[in-house]
Amino acid sequence: MWQLYGGGVGSPPLGFPAVPPAPDWSWLEGSLAQLLSGWWEQVPVQLGYGDAVGFNIDFRGEDQQSVERVSVMCEEPGGLVLLVDDRAVPGGTREDVMRARGWRQRIMGWWQRDFEDDGADGAARAAKMVVEELLRRGARSPDALNVTDVRAERGGLLALPGLAIAR
């Protein structure tokens, strides 16, 4: 589902296995849930305190000019964290609406939700929340999504072959 080459002995992998792009939203949600479940279990062991891995899911907004973005990360010690960029909405989406969707905190035009207290169930909840937010914000289909800013805070090469997003 994910691989991190942090440098050191040897060479980075020449290629990574990959799953096909998600044909529908249910498939994407399942792939994302598996990836986040792996992160929830493995990232605290593989990364040091204060380190994080993450990526953005981007797509063109309804006007085809703006970029909508949901950020997904896993950090030690906080666990799984989602952020949604709400700056494209004039004045931002109303607080009661965002809280009803499950978002908990507004931070400089972004809404955040952490799943630290959800344990192993947090991965499935986070995946469902990502897909619901993508749909609410007008994503047409999984093949219209892009993965950007794939990152490991401590450096290295982070690959997400199991994410099921084509680009």
Image (cartoon, rainbow, N blue to C red):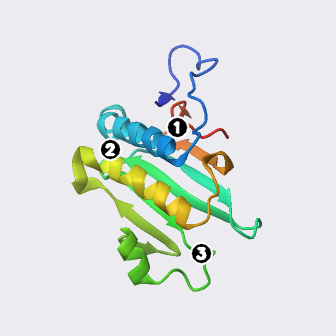
- Report the Cα–Cα distance between label 3 and label 2: 31 Å
Residue 145 shown left or right of residue 6 in the figure: right
- Name above or below for residue 93 compared with residue 54: below
Q: Is residue 98 visible?
A: yes
Whole-percent x, y for residue 107 in the image: 45, 73
Please tell me which of labels 1 and 3 falls first in the chain.
3
Residue 49 badge: 2
| SS category of the residue bearing label 1 | loop
Residue drawn at (31%, 53%), measured in percent from left and top?
78
CB atoms at circles 3 and 2 under 8 Å apart?
no
Residue 105 badge: none
CB atoms at circles 2 and 1 under 8 Å apart?
no
| SS category of the residue bearing label 3 | loop
Residue 24 shown left or right of residue 94 in the figure: right
Whole-percent x, y for residue 13 in the image: 59, 18
When asked about the image quadrant of residue 86, the answer is bottom right
Whole-percent x, y for residue 77 in the image: 29, 49
Name the mark nearer the viewer: 3 or 2. Answer: 3
Name the mark nearer the viewer: 2 or 1. Answer: 1
CB atoms at circles 1 and 3 under 8 Å apart?
no
Residue 107 shown left or right of residue 80 in the figure: right
Residue drawn at (35%, 32%), measured in percent from left and top?
46
Residue 87 badge: 3
Residue drawn at (51%, 32%), measured in percent from left and top?
162
Residue 163 badge: 1
Neighbour class for label 2 at 10 Å: few (<14), some, many (≥20)?
few
Q: Is residue 153 visible?
A: no
Query: Which amino acid does the dot numbered 1 rest on?
Result: Leu
Q: Which quarter of the rendered picture does the C terminus lie within?
A: top right
Query: Which amino acid does the dot numbered 2 rest on?
Result: Tyr
When asked about the image quadrant of residue 65, the answer is bottom right
